[in-house]
Each structure stands twice: as structure tokens, then as C-alpha cells.
Amino acid sequence: MGRRRPPVATPEPHLMAHLRSRVWGPAEFVGLPPWWLTAEGLLVGCAAAGVLIGSSVAGAWYGVPGLADGEGGLVCVAALVLYLCVVRAGRALVGIVAVLGACLALLAPQAAVGVVLAERGRVESVVVTSVEGGPGTVSGHGRYFCSVADQYGAPLQVRIWRGCGKATRPGDALAVVHDMKGRVPPRGVEAGASWTDPLRSLSGWAAALVAACALAVVRSFRLSHTVSGCPAPSAPGEGTSR
């Protein structure tokens, strides 16, 4: 006769609840969260998104490399993650906020360049010297890239893809917008572009970051506890001990 296997130990309910609380946050309230907690979460998320985008725009506008290249935004993301850890938000939600914040910090510099060029850019004509890329290339998403030179024959240090297409040939003229103060690289001209268009491209990332921050803050809510560790007989929503 085979030996009987010992019964498999199942995790205790309070242990599972503890693990779930650490991963997603305790959310110790009944029904809807307190209004002030929701307001706090939205405020944190909006402030974080505003600082991330605003620091990149300010860095590009005033020529501050540490802000223009997204390093300042990454520092803001680190501060946001530290705040969520202090309030003991769920680890999974903290990770989601960190990823969304880092993506927004790395995408904001390109949008900031577009804002600067839309506000104080000057359109000039340049001459195409060579054309590279296209649908058969691995990088560049199938775009065509034009190397150009200004009216004095000096080559620009960046390649232009806006306005550069399959029919473009060396010797053709392209319209390029320059920053009059030379703080951001030139770009090809986009018809009907305004300073709000680059920021609109970040709206999805910013909205996702605000939602993740609000959820992390709301789920970090804990009821007040007594010294012995037993829940105090207060009603849900009365006091918090993060």
C-alpha cells in the first residue's frame, strides 16, 4: 500500500489578505472612497503630469540641458515613487506609476521641441543633399530621411523626415523651421501645426499617469488602528493611518 500524502497546507486567509494588501493596497473603506482621498489622488497625478511636461518645455525654452533631455522628469518620477512608498501604496500600482511616469518623461522632450518651434520658430528653405530610408529599412518606421544644407551650403547636423518623401530628390527645396535662439534642433515644416499639437500627443500618457496615481493613493487608505493592532471601533472613512 502506498503511503498517504500529507495534506497540502493552504495559506491562511489573513496571510492572503496581507499579501493582497501589499500588492494592490489595503483600500480599507466600504463603498466609495472618501471624497478627500479621491481629490488627493487626482491632485498628485495632475501635479506629477504637469511637472513632467512643464519641466521639459521649460528646459527646451530656456536651453537647460538637464530639463530639456528628460533627466529632470526622471527625477520627478523618482520623487513620485518615493511619495507613494511613504503612503504605503500597493507595490504593483507603484510599479505601474513608475513605468508610465518614465515613458512620459522620455516622450515629453520631443513634444517640448515642437512647442518651442511652433512659438518662436522661423521657416527657411534648405536644399536636399541626399535621401535615405524608406519602407524597406529596418529603423525609422519606413520614413524617408533627407540630409539638407542651408542657403550658404553649410550642412545641417540633423536629418529631416517631415516633408521628405519618396519623390524627394537631391537638389529639391524643403521648408525647415529653425529656433531663432538656436536652443532646439530644426524640423521640417508641418502644415497647420500649432503649439498645442505636440502636447496633445502626450494626453493619453498623462491621463494614464493621473489615473494610476489616483488609484494608488485611494487604495493606500488604512483605518486607524489601536496600539495592540486591533481595528479601532471607528466607522469606515474616519481617520487614516498610512
Image: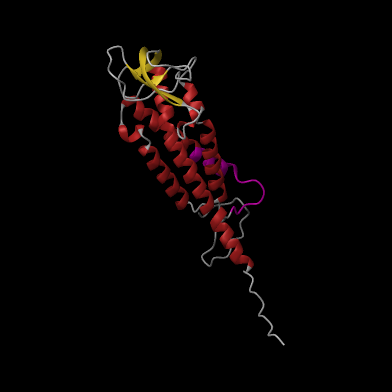
Image quadrant assignment for residue 155 = top left
Query: Is 103 rendered above or below residue 30?
Result: above
* Residue 64 inside the magenta-drawn segment: no
For image coordinates 59% across by 42% down, the residue present is: 35
Could one spot residue 101 in this view of the protein? yes
Please provide percent x and percent y for residue 68: 35, 32
Please provide percent x and percent y for residue 48: 46, 38
For image coordinates 46% across by 32% down, the residue present is: 137
Relative to residue 194, is residue 236 drawn left or right? Answer: right
Q: Nearer the viewer, residue 30 or 44?
A: 44
Please provide percent x and percent y for residue 222: 55, 54
Query: Is 189 rendered above or below residue 214?
Result: above
Q: Nearer the viewer, residue 150 or 11?
A: 150
Q: Magenta segment, which residues? A: 27-45
* Residue 36 inside the magenta-drawn segment: yes
Please provide percent x and percent y for residue 225: 54, 60
Query: Is 157 rendered above or below residue 153?
Result: below
Relative to residue 44, is residue 55 drawn left or right? Answer: left
Colour scheme in use: secondary structure
Look at the image and tell me in which quarter the N terminus lies.
bottom right
Could one spot residue 90 in this view of the protein? no
Q: Nearer the viewer, residue 134 or 54?
A: 134
Q: Residue furthest right?
A: 1
Query: Is 211 rendered above or below residue 182?
Result: below
Q: Residue furthest bottom?
A: 1
For image coordinates 43% across by 37% down, the residue present is: 105
Q: How many marks?
A: 0
Image quadrant assignment for residue 185 = top left
